[in-house]
Image: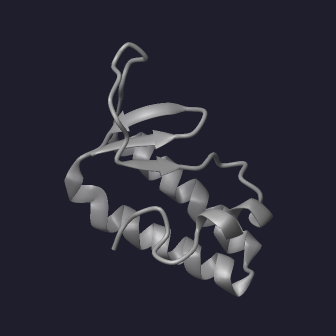
Amino acid sequence: MIIRIMGQGQYKVPSSLYDDLNAIDNRIVDHVTKGDEKAYKQDLAALISKVKQNGKVLGAEEIVESDVIVPPEDLTFAEAKDVFTGTGIFED
């Protein structure tokens, strides 16, 4: 699975991590829905960290379509309300 973190590049991540990443994504949607900005920021950082720790960076010369695009860690809470809706960025 190819995941792009906006502003930080693409990572090849094992598909076995999909459920874990989706669970974090679902928590982020809940935080945004409930207005919990602090928890939102913590889980967005956790999502990005998990991708970086478990993924292999793809070189800039590799042009591959991303399966999932993760917003940058500095995404504001107001902007998150447009991104983390419904099922979030990972399809359930």
x, y percent for residue 24 = 46, 68
Residue furthest out toward the top: 61
x, y percent for residue 33 = 66, 83
**The C terminus, quarter of image:** bottom left
Is 36 positioned to the left or the right of 87 in the image?
right
Residue furthest out toward the bottom: 34
Q: Is residue 80 above or below residue 72?
A: below
x, y percent for residue 28 = 57, 71
Is 18 positioned to the left or the right of 31 in the image?
left
- From the viewer's side, name the closer residue of 35 and 53: 35
Residue under the image location 72 percent in, 48 percent down: 74
Q: Quadrant of residue 53?
A: top left
x, y percent for residue 61 = 38, 13
- From the viewer's side, name the closer residue of 21 and 46: 21
Is 79 positioned to the left or the right of 47 in the image?
right
Q: Is residue 55 above or below residue 67?
A: above
Residue under the image location 33 percent in, 19 percent down: 62
- From the viewer's side, name the closer residue of 91 and 47: 91
Residue under the image location 47 percent in, 62 percent down: 89
Q: Coloured how?
A: one colour
Residue under the image location 76 percent in, 65 percent down: 77
Q: How many marks?
A: 0
Q: Is residue 65 above or below residue 63?
A: below
